[in-house]
Structure formats: C-alpha cells, structure tokens
Image (cartoon, rainbow, N blue to C red):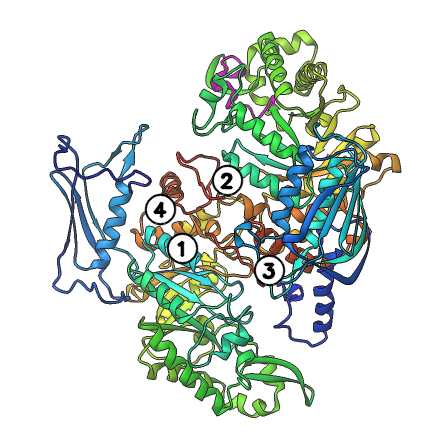
Amino acid sequence: MFGSTKKLGLSKSRRTGPSELTELQVWITSPDSECDDYPSVTSDESYELSVDLPFAVLKAPKVWGALHGLETFSQLLYEDEYGAKSVNATTISDFPRFAHRGILLDSSRHFLPIKVILANLETMAMNKFNVFHWHIVDDQSFPYLSRTFPQLSQQGAYHPYTHVYTPADVKMVIEFARLRGIRVIPEFDTPGHTQSWGKGQKDLLTPCYSGSKPSGTFGPINPILNTTYDFMNQFFKEISTVFPDAYVHLGGDEVDFTCWRSNPDIQQFMEQHRFQTRLQLLDIVTTTNKGYMIWQEVFDNGVKLKPDTLIHVWKGNQEQYQNEMANVTSSGYQTLLSTPWYLNRISYGQDWHGYYKADPQDFKGTEEQKKLVIGGEACLWGEYVDATNLTPRLWPRASAVAERLWSAKDVTDINDAFNRLSMHRCRMVERGIPAEPLFSSYCPREYKGI
Amino acid sequence: MNIMFAVSSGRYTRANFILPLLIIIQLGLHTVEGVWPLPQAFTSSTERYPLNPQAFYFGYGKQSAAQQGCSVLDTAFKRYFSLIFPDYSSANGVLRFSVDKPFLVEVSVDQDDCESYPQEDSSEKYNLSVCEGKASLKAETVWGAVRGLETFSQMVYQDDFGSYFVNKTEIEDFPRFQFRGILLDTSRHYLPVQAILKTLDAMAYSKFNVFHWHIVDDPSFPYQSSTFPDLSSKGAFHPMTHIYTQSDVRRVISYARLQGIRVLPEFDSPGHTKSWGKGQSDLLTPCYRGSTPSGTFGPVNPVLPSTYQFMEKLFKEVSSVFPDSYIHLGGDEVNFSCWKSNPDVRAFMQKMGFGADFTKLEAFYIENIVNITSALNKTSIVWQDVFDYHEKIPEDTVLHIWKGLPEVYQTELSRITKAGKRVLLAAPWYINHISYGQDWRNYYTVQPQNFSGTEEQKKLVIGGEVCMWGEYVDATNLNPRLWPRASAAAERLWSDEKQTSSVDSAFPRLQDFRCKLVRRGIQAEPLYVGHCKHEYQGV
C-alpha cells in the first residue's frame, strides 16, 4: 500500500491529524478461522469492510475472506499529486460469485523458474484468484522431481539439475500459495501428453508399430500392462501426499489412438477394455481420497465417472462450448470453463474485451444446472511462453477473467471496466509486476525493471 | 499446428534419423552458423582453441589508424570482454591451472573515424580471421570493427564444464543493406531511458544500425524542447516524470554512437500532432461545425505563417540536437475533414488555386517543411503517403513504405523507385502486430528486392525497418515483444538472401541466438518449446 515510503520511527509523541485513519481492525468472526488449514472449494471467502473513523473494520468468517478484504482495502487507497495517501469512507460487503477461480501455468513446454511462479501467485492474490492449476509435466519435459521415481526427472527434464522442481521447491510454492488463499491443484496429464514420462520409466509408454515391427516411437501410456498400474499407484500415492489439495487434475485430453491401434497386443484389448482402462486410472486416484478434475474428452467419450468429478471444458467455438456446458451439467457433473480464456492465444488489440464478456453461465439450462458451474480458469499454455514473457502476457488480461469470476453477473459495462482496469494495471506495475498496457496511456509510476 | 516445426534440441525426438542431423547442427552452432545474422562469406572448422579470460587481450594492430584512446573501440573492448566471458568477474580471484597461452584479438582499422558519428554510407565491412592464439579483425572504419567484435563474441562458447573455446575460422562480412533500423514509439507510451538504452544494446547484438525514434505523436509530447518548453510541460503525459530532457537525449545519442547506431528522430506532421497543440496554441487547425468552432483540433494549420515560423525554430533546434544527417518528417495519415471544415483553410485553398484537392494543401505544407530541413542541411525521410500525394520533394528524399500486403507494397516499391527515389521498407515488419504462433517466419521470408524493376531501381532500396508501434507496448512488454522476432528481420537485412532462404535451417540458429540474448540480459521470448541452459531469472 505504501510502496517505497520509508518507515518513519514510531514515536509516541507524534500526534495524529484530526482525521487520519491509523488503524484497520481485522476480525475473524467464526470459531474456526481455518488459519492452519488449506483452502478448499467450499471455503468461505466472504468479508465485510467498513472504512470509517476512528478505525476501519474488516470482518470475515474465515481467514480467506480476511485476505480478500485486505487486498480490497489496499486498492481503496489513492494518492494526490504530492504523494499523500487517502481513503474514502466506504462500506463493502463482498463474496465471490464462483468458488473456483483459477490460472493454469504450463511448466513442461518451458521450464518456469520458481521466482516467476511465486511472482504470479502474488499477482493472482491481487486479483482474487484462488486456484493455481499447475500443469507441471507434459510431452516435452518432466521437471517434477519425484522421490519415488527420481529417474522420471533425471531422464525427462530439460536438465536434471537446473530445470527441475525439487520437493523443497514444490513445498515452497504450496505454502506461498496457501498464505495467499490459493489452492495448488497439480495436473499429471495421462494417458496422452506423456512422452517425457517414458524417458525415465521404461515400458510405461506404448511402443508404436509400423506393420508388424516396432517403429521405435512411443505413444500414450500402455494401458494393458500391470506394471503400468503398479507405477501409477505408487506415483499417485506420492502425489496425493505431496499436494494437500482435495483435488488432483488427471488430464485425459487429446489421446491419439493411432499408436494404440498399431500395437498388436493392444489391438485385442482396445475394443473391449478401452473405457475400463481409463476407469482403472480414475479408481487409483480415488483410493488416494482425492477428487479428480478431468478435461472434457473423458466425459465426451462416455467414460463412467464418479459423481463428484469436475469436468474442465476447453474446446470449441462459443456455440460449441456453451452446448458442452449444457451437456455436462445436465448429466449432473460440476464443471469449469476455460474455452474462452486461453490467454496463450494472443492477437493484436484489446483482446481483454472478449475475456471480460464471456460468462460461464451463458448456456441453455435450468437453475440447478447453472449451479453446477463452479467457476473457470484462464489458461496460459507454454508453447510460446516462458519467464521472459509470461507475466506481461498473463496480466492484465487475466484480470478481466478475475472480475468475471468474482463479481456479480450484471457487472458488464466495458467502458467503465476499461477505466478501472487501467488503474488496476498501473497498481500492479507499481507493485513491481510487469502487467502490459491496455492502450496508449501512462502510469504515474512506470515499470522500473527492464 | 506446428508439429513440423518441432525441432527440439536433442533428447526428446521421436525418429532416430533426426538425431545425427541435430548433432551436426549442434556442432554447426559452435562455428560460424552460430552467428546471427549469418556472415556473407566464411570458412569454418571444427578445430578449436581454448580461451582463458585471464589470458585474453584486445589490442590495436600496429598499422591501425585508430589506436588506444579511440573511444568507440576502447569501450567496445570492455563491453565485449564481459559479453564473451559472462561467468567471469575479476572478483573470482586468480586460479590458474597452468601457464596459459594468451589469446590476442588484434583490431586494425583503415580510417580513424573514432570521434565521428556513423553515417548513412559508413563502411561496416570487416574481415575476421581466427587462428591459434590470435584473432585478426580488420575493417575500414571503427563501425566495421564493432560489427566484427560482435561476430567474434558470438563465436565464443562454453563446454559443459564452463571452459571457453573459439573455433578456427575465416570471415569476410559486410551488410547487404546500409539502413537496418528499429522504430520505437515513445508517444503512445513513455519509455524510460533505460528501456531505450537496453534496446540499443540488443540492436547491436543483431547488427541493427539505425534507431528511428518516433519521439512524439498524438497522445503525448515527451521531448523537452529548449526553444519551446511548453510543448512538453503541457503535452507530455507528465511534465516531469514522462519527459526526455536534453541530457537524456544526448545520453541516448552518445550511447548509440558507441555501438555504431545512428539516431534518426521523427517529428511527424502535419497529422499525428494533437499533443503539440497543448503547448503551442494556434498551431493546430481548429475544426468547425458549420460556422462555429467545434472545440476540437485537427492537423497542423498550414495556412498561418506562424506555423512555419514555429516549425523553422523547432527544426533548427532538432537539427542541432540530433547529429545524424537525416531527419524523419512523418507526413502520414492526414485527416482532411478538419481542414475542410475550417473557413480560413478553405479560403486559403481558393487563393492558392488548389480547388477542393486537399492533397495539394498537404503537399504545400510538406514542401515548406522539407525546405526548412534542407536549409538546415538535413536529408528528409517521409512516409509513403507524401509520395502518393505529390512529387515536389527533393531528389534525395527517402520514402518509407509502410502500407499493405506484399502485392501492395511491391507495387509501391516499383512505383517509387521508378521515379528515381530511394526507399525504405517497413510494411512487412510491423512487429507490433502480434499473433499466435511462430510469426518470426513471416519476417524472415520477406524479399525486399522482389518487385518488378530494373537493377538500378533495386539499388534504390537502401534498407528496411522493424516497427514497434507503441499503442500496446511499454517497458513491461517491449523486450519480449521485440526480441527475437526483430532478429529475423536483422538477418534478412544483413545477410545474403540465397544463403538464408531456408526457414527450417534458420530455426535452430535463431533458437540458439535467442538463448544468447537471454544470457546477455535481453528478455527475448521463446520461438517454440525448448529450453536454454541459462534461463531468464527475472519476473
């Protein structure tokens, strides 16, 4: 709030001005503050803020609400041209429209040093995002250092020492996030998107065949071997202890069947058992007591899922994803929307308008169905993104999504949003975050890092 | 979408036949192929020599016209020493394994142009010969020597244990085009001086040699004029924090000079001048609604003598502040509706016999401005709109082509060169126009001399410019947006077109060059999936 203002020594003789606000009291109003817990999808994030004299009061049932209230309070401050800070008398009663407001980062296509992850968690908190969807491994690299299977990153990371996340790194991210009310949901995407897994785990991936001989290349995870399930069991056991969130994302997207089809051993299995193999993996995760999130393909392909499965919609144009939302919710599943919020898809101009306008509950369905939409996620896939360009590409465009997921449905005035988002963007810049500009403009304090 | 572009750096390839090819490329990247832009002529070898930062020296050849005391080369030696040995700091202490043989980079230039500014026709040619214990760098001018030092610095590499090496090589290099520029726009968003200096560094790494400073425009006027201080005090986003003082400007110019970069200022008029009117009343045309002023203002008012008196004084100052012999006068996108609405302007049109043809009025204006700058001994560069509207400009005025797709700009290239005028090409290199995917390929495959015309005409293409307009760009995203995409154009402007016709061959080289940029502290974004040994550690 006070930026680079040096802390003046607190001397008792200093008199406060007649109308200086000197105290913000924070009250946790419920018996269990959840201070030592991890946030969850059912956490109460509401708060009430009253800015008044003699002191401002922030009341929240849980610490999560208090964190959001502090962020709000910090955003109420403004400066005059001499740098003097003021705040107006205000009463705010606030709570999020959606419980799951996430950002996806991809640390496989490009390794993301811890610093940039932490800086973005900090920025997420400024935008009241509360889920960090960590798409940690994929085809290109496996940076997660597993204590059960250290070969996975030893062979699968871009570099086994400099491009890995050690257990200490992971712990740091999780705790840093927790202190900001952010859940960390890891995604270990299978059975596709697993090329890098096969480097350190022989026989995990399906050997593809050309004709009757192996071609030398590998496809998705081999669903017919018992060793596969032994591995998965142990692996997800570790994951479930390392990541404390109640949910884990299993991926399940874009599985290319051609390699499976080419393999004679699998040919027999596929017709009968394809759906069951996926179910087996899902069962494994259930034994770890976690709920699971999956990309929409698993639902689209008719796999039988547990009732508390969270389905992640990401495909299609507007009409298609709205249909998908309707389908998923009419089958009784909870759902998340990401399709209109693929922030990696850059284009020239103010594309934040599109992100701001998209609404996860815009589809034909009953009130019951709409209640099953628990939120959405802005995705920053990593094919063209690493620490050099991640932060300006993510912010402030993701802030448009943040408001859509937190604020009331009828907050849709785009011109007003432009003015407020411009100010919010300058605020992030002042806090040291290189959020890119919306349009020709200036911030009183421009970005100092080069 | 991009499966065919997925040349990864070694380990996770699917087909085994790619592996040997990659090995060759990896070796290649330690030779001259690892230099960006690709030198014109070279022979390379796998024979390599170890380098030790503690036994490495720059020196002047006995015959060199420039000797110690030459600012450009003395500072270049210091700069390139740090770039060549990024791990080395003299605080590391002295650890010697054995008596190392020293390595000397001996630099000789024919002309001592050390204290001058680079010119439009300065020779940037150099010969570089690397053999055991010595590298010989010969050039006609210090600017050529700086280019040669850049090349040499890109040839030094480290093995997995951090030891430095350079391979035996012979290079004869010179640029295909004399004018290889980058445009930065400091009006749509103010760019702190540090951001400009950083851009100059990165430009030198890709051998760009002109910084086109689009310093003022509609949204803001950050240039602090000593003759007309109100221009910035009323026209800048903020009169103190968002301006370029005379000292800032001098700093940019001298920093650029040391890297062989010319600074070309653009004071765009008569359009794009809204911010000028804030500090100079009566400069802009008052627009009318019917018979009364509407309160808004349009382009510069071409009918008042005070306009030209002002312009003369301003350009006199600009000419002395900016030492380059060229000046960019803009002249693009003039909206005629405000002029049309103003009764005084219409009366003037009648008096001058222009009728209702406002292009003639613009032509009249531009001619006057060009006369002013010619009298100040400057050569003008103007946007193509000026040619499209009229022809009465001095023979040596350069036209800057910015509009259209290849069919359109190729036609324009033909037309303008047919009229005997020199041209600069910017149209295919508006890299502020971002899109999803590997758009560097579009910038790389531009063919600046591919248009119908004679050989003489083709020679009139003096070069090109990468434009980074500022509507959506400021210091938060300038570097990743500019680099390495601008480097694709850099090779197109420096190297031989035939030798650099394959995008697929360029890909691994540009990926590697991008990692070099990151190592040097330039926040260059990735081309595609992959990694660098030393990743960017910032935010």
Badge 3 element? loop
Q: Residues within 10 Å of mark 1 (few under 14, many from 20)?
A: many
The type of residue carrying mark 2 is Asp
Is residue A357 visible in this depiction of the protein?
no
The answer for which chain carries disc 4 is A
Name the residue nearer the viewer: B218 or B51: B51
Circle 4 or circle 2, nearest the eye = 2
Circle 4 or circle 1, nearest the eye = 1
Circle 3 or circle 4, nearest the eye = 3
Above or below: residue A213 compared with residue B378: below
Badge 2 element? loop
Name which residue lies at 63% across and 42% down: B78
Q: Which mark is residue B474?
A: 2
Name which residue lies at 49% across and 13% down: B281
The type of residue carrying mark 1 is Asn
Q: Which residues are magenta?
A: B269-287
Q: Which residue is mark 4?
A: A412
